Image: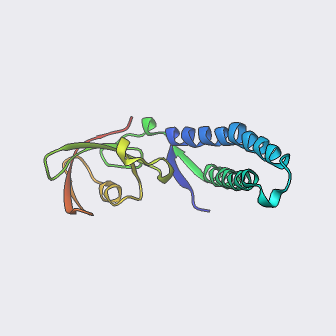
Amino acid sequence: MEKIPMTVRGQGLIEAELHELKHTRRPAIIEAIAEARAHGDLSENAEYQYAKEEQSHIEGRIEELEAVLSRAEVIDPTKLHGDKVMFGATVTVLDDDNKKVVYQIVGEHESDIKSGKLAVAAPLARALIGKTKGAVVEVNTPRGPQSYEIEKIEYK
């Protein structure tokens, strides 16, 4: 089985979601199913059907998160250092418009481009990995080719 890289923060987010699902949402949906059963005929009971569907989604998500955690390779960026971009690095780049943008290269399950968390499999992250300060990378984007110059590499 292939390991799934993630930061300590990413592991914490997944564990928090798993805890919420197991200890809050699962018991609530079990209670909703019991209530819906009490209303009688299950074949025409919309509340029961909805609750069973929701239970299926919750159980599926729990299985998915447990599988991710079982294959997780947790990397603490604060313990890394170097002059090359690696997983966990926080990279400041200058784009074609001379605008500074800061990204942290993280695992797939914790990526959120709006908050600067760039998935390691994203084209820009793949282009940056292994490069050093001052390097310029070119990436094809929906707006066409874009260049990014690495201004700073940090591990924090």
- Residue 117 falls left or right of residue 132: right
Of residues 89 and 103, the one drawn nearer to the viewer in this rendering: 103
* Residue in the image at 43% along x and 35% along y: 78
- Residue 80 falls left or right of residue 137: right
Q: Give the quarter of the figure containing the N terminus.
A: bottom right
Is residue 116 among the parts visible in the rendering?
Answer: no
Of residues 4 and 22, the one drawn nearer to the viewer in this rendering: 22
Q: Residue 117, position in %: x, y?
A: 39, 45
* Count of number-bearing discs: 0
Of residues 1 and 123, the one drawn nearer to the viewer in this rendering: 123
Quadrant hosting residue 124: bottom left
Q: Give the quarter of the figure containing the C terminus.
A: top left
Quadrant hosting residue 11: top right
- Residue 7 falls left or right of residue 22: left
Q: Residue 10, position in %: x, y?
A: 51, 42
Q: Residue 42, position in %: x, y?
A: 82, 57
Of residues 8 and 85, the one drawn nearer to the viewer in this rendering: 8
Is residue 81 among the parts visible in the rendering?
Answer: yes
Image height check: is 95 above or below 127? Answer: above
Q: Residue 31, position in %: x, y?
A: 78, 41
* Residue in the image at 34% along x and 55% along y: 125
Task: Tell me the colour scheme of the image.
Answer: rainbow
